[in-house]
Image (cartoon, rainbow, N blue to C red):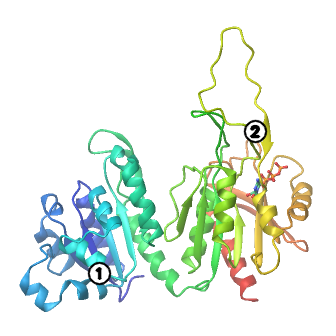
Amino acid sequence: MLTGKHILLVITGGIAAYKALELIRLIQKAGGTVQAILTGAATEFVTPLSVSALSGNPALSALFDLTQESRIGHIELSRSADLIVVAPASADFLAKLAHGLADDLASTCLLATDTAILAAPAMNVRMWTAAATQRNLATLRADGVTIIGPDEGPMACGEFGPGRMAEPAAILKAIAAHFAGAGGPLAGKRIIVTSGPTREPLDPVRYISNASSGKQGVAIAEALSNRGAEVVFVTGPAEAARPAGCAIIPVTTAIEMRDAVLAALPADAAIFVAAVADWRAASLSSGKLKKEPGAPPPAIELVQNPDILAEVSHLPPGRRPPLVIGFAAETESLIDNARAKRLRKGCDWLLANDVGNGSGVLGGPDNHVYFLDGTTELDWGKQSKSEVGENLAERIEKRLFGR
Ligand code: CTP
């Protein structure tokens, strides 16, 4: 899987640093080679000796190690790698990377490189949710850094929430996806995917939304990215972990999602998996809506949100992606409603699924999809959301290349 691939692994300080040892083993098992750099803080958690012994290469840490500098040099070190992986990536290191600081070997190598970077953050949940960290992540994503994880769960510090480093097996998967994509059949194709729910605020603390988990959108984005497509993933606030290797554009409301999609054009295809809230409040209360004793509940006036799929489907040729794909979430008369919806929205393909009570589709691992393109109507049967992603990606590939 990684035969002939050389990974520069940057290990930064954090309790998750011990998992980097497992990652080295997995990369080697997959056929790759590893050169590790430890930051000063990382050496407090794992020893350079363990890292050197496992990787088979001397673990580097000081910038001015003259022997190393004359033999390889920090510029060469970062450029000779096929991929740079930062795992674990501490909050401090992400901040340095986002701001272009270069005060040790690890940060200097990263600033001096034009090699792709994949970072697996690990930190306390409050450090992860801190506005500064989220700002730095947005900067790094915009700079093209792929962020994998973090996972959610109990943490070494006793708290619970997002911040645990992604498991080494998941990081390996993201590394493999990076290389599979580089020469994949969809290389050079730009595809927009919308995913997750949107959230429409009523006041500073309340909102209208829906139960979309975002899992189907993630599965489709990953299948496309694994085939080498450049995927722009526009996602509402969803629970599913974000897809590896995609440019992530987080949004909250339907209007933000529409603006993000239009800004991401032109594209070769656009797939609208998001469960966009159909309505938003006509006016947003600046203060929290209060319940007055004896007063009736407030009447909330709603207005319709823009229909992003219909808007993109009806763009003039040249601006409209050559392939526009919608989903139809239905609870009754699935096929009849789906046929009508495809025509109404003006998209090329429509994937219809039954999201009624008992279907288990919303939030679940599986989906039962019907494919409609105006001439064929196919029952894909019950499949995992990943299989739906693979089938759709394969069909898109055939269509975009006229196969
Ligand atoms: N969609 C969209 N913008 C909206 C509403 C829906 O882009 N404001 C897209 C969805 O991403 C999906 C398709 O349109 O690809 C159909 O969504 P669905 O919720 O099934 O249909 P609605 O348009 O909401 O119609 P209805 O509520 O009548 O079923």
- Residue 162 is left or right of residue 205, and the answer is left
Q: Residue at label 2?
A: 282
Across and down, in percent, residue 98 comes to: 35, 65
Kindly indicate whether the residue at mark 2 contacts the one at mark 1 (C-beta within 8 angstroms).
Answer: no
Across and down, in percent, residue 83 comes to: 36, 80
Q: Residue at x 24, y 60 (%)?
A: 17
Q: In the picture, which quadrant includes the C terminus?
A: bottom right
Q: Secondary structure at mark 1?
A: loop
Report how far apart the C-alphas of labels 1 and 2 lie in the structure.
50 Å
Q: Residue at label 1?
A: 112
Give the quadrant of residue 369.
Answer: bottom right
Q: In the image shown, does 392 or 93 lie closer to the viewer?
A: 93
| Residue 46, numbered label | none
Residue 18 vs 363, above or below: the answer is: below
Across and down, in percent, residue 135 comes to: 42, 56
Q: Residue at x 90, y 71 (%)?
A: 374
Select label 1 or label 2 by which is in front.
Answer: 2
Q: Is residue 235 visible?
A: yes
Q: Is residue 370 visible?
A: no
Q: In the image shown, does 31 or 89 lie closer to the viewer?
A: 89
Would you say the beta carbon of the disc 1 residue lies within 8 angstroms of ligand 1?
A: no
Q: Secondary structure at mark 2?
A: loop
